Amino acid sequence: MPQLVLATLVQPNGSHLASWLAPGAQDDAGTNIDWYRRIARIAEDGKLDLFFIADTPAARTDHLKAWSRAPVFMNVLEPLTLLSALAGSTSHIGLGGTVSTSFYEPYNLARQFGALDHITGGRAAWNVVTSANDYAAKNFGQDKLPPHAERYARAREFVDVTFQLWDTWEDDAFITDHETCQNFLPEKQHPVAHEGTHFRVHGALNLARTPQGRPVILQAGASDTGKDFAAETAEVVFGTSATIEGAVEFYKDLKGRLAKYGRTPDMLKILAGVTIVVGDSKEEAEAMLAGWQALLHPDVGVMRLSQDLETDLSDLPLDEPVPDHRIPTHSNHHQAYFAEIVGLIRQGLTLREIAMRYNRSKAVICGTPTSIADDMQAWFEAGACDGFMLTFPVLPACLEAFTAKVVPELRRRGLFRTEYTGTTLRENLGIPRPGNRHVAK
């Protein structure tokens, strides 16, 4: 019987923008490695597949009063450093992080993620992004992000070069033969010779092929271009549909694109993004969420809308609808989030109502362990996903409740593992290890 893939996206104190204000929040969670170790161990004790860190290489530099009320990405550890530090505190759970193709070079990334895969014994995962805010662009000599299509063209070339670098050495290249005084077989090295639009790379990676062949590739693109890119290169995709119907449509669309790239459906896992709140009753769970929502300052809600709609709404009255003429003609950043906000505006809701309701296209499941398991099973059996990217409004409490109460219910139904079955992330996900392209030839 197929089983769910379960991953969790971890943010300091939780995914809710007011989590830092919740009772029991840890003021230094963003930079405290012991806090992250605690969360990773809870997730691994629950046998989750993946511990995932989102990131942007920038701090916000405007609207600082509003950002001071929701300090997202304002004081956090760099992902690869953080995941390497967590490697020794975990033994089975996958460790994934975001690194942008817009601001890195393929060689650096191939070497760093390759090292992480070796350090973890084959548990590394790279979330491939093109970045979606101009704060990051300004840190790297740009006034603003390049157009969407240009960023994806660079990302495609970046991934292609990175894959070539990870295939520099065949799996059995390093023989370490003391008797013949030979460390590696020269004929099993395959230097990269790449001349492209965005990158020129001539050389070899100074690192043996990794335990997984290459780290697992994660993506979350929702645009048409993003879905094609994911169908070509991704192995785990984070879905952004807030409804089961939308998730089914996304699942069919993305899986249907795989054949064009010579891939089969088992090579890609689609995880629906879901926020989980566990209570002894549905009313208790909803009351918890409402309590956290009440801590959210209106400035924060409006700022988040302005960021994702890519236009400043802070001058508008909170208790009136947003005029249609304030909607930009197109999006250059997160197209799924942009579309969600436009839909809410066109329902005639007030700015305050939109700010409180907007959830970045995520489904929210509040309820008892049984009802949450019911909903997860319904999504899975309807063909909406292969599993879930779980976010928890407040950490560690919400994750502890999920692993202690919901996971046993999923196991009772045969929907989730009782123990890890593999030693690498690929093995636990059921995703095949890629062969070296030079051996295949």
Image (cartoon, rainbow, N blue to C red):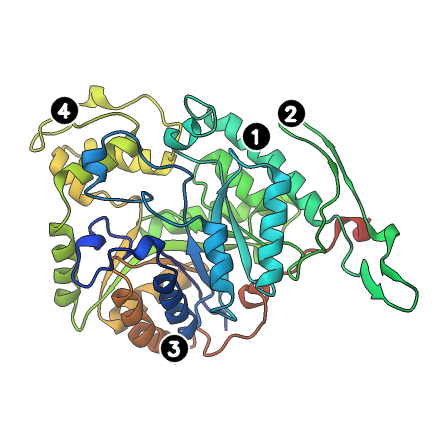
Left or right, 431 with reference to 176: left
| Residue at numbered disc 3 | 413
Few, some or many C-alpha atoms within 10 Å of disc 2 (few <14, some 14-19, many ≥20)?
A: few
Looking at the image, which residue sits at the far right? Answer: 180
Looking at the image, is mark 1 or mark 2 earlier in the sequence?
1
Q: Which residue sits at x=22%, y=71%?
A: 368
Identify which residue, 418 or 210, lies in the foreground.
210
Could you say whether the residue bearing mark 1 is in a helix, strand or loop? Answer: helix
Q: CA distance from mark 1 to mark 3?
A: 44 Å
N-terminal label among 3 and 4: 4
Residue at 16% x, 23% y is 323
The residue that mark 4 highlights is 315
In space, the residues marked 3 and 2 are separated at their CA atoms by 51 Å
Q: Which mark is residue 153?
A: 1
Callout 3: SS: loop
Q: Do tag 2 and tag 4 residues touch (Cβ < 8 Å)?
A: no
Q: Which residue is mark 2?
A: 197
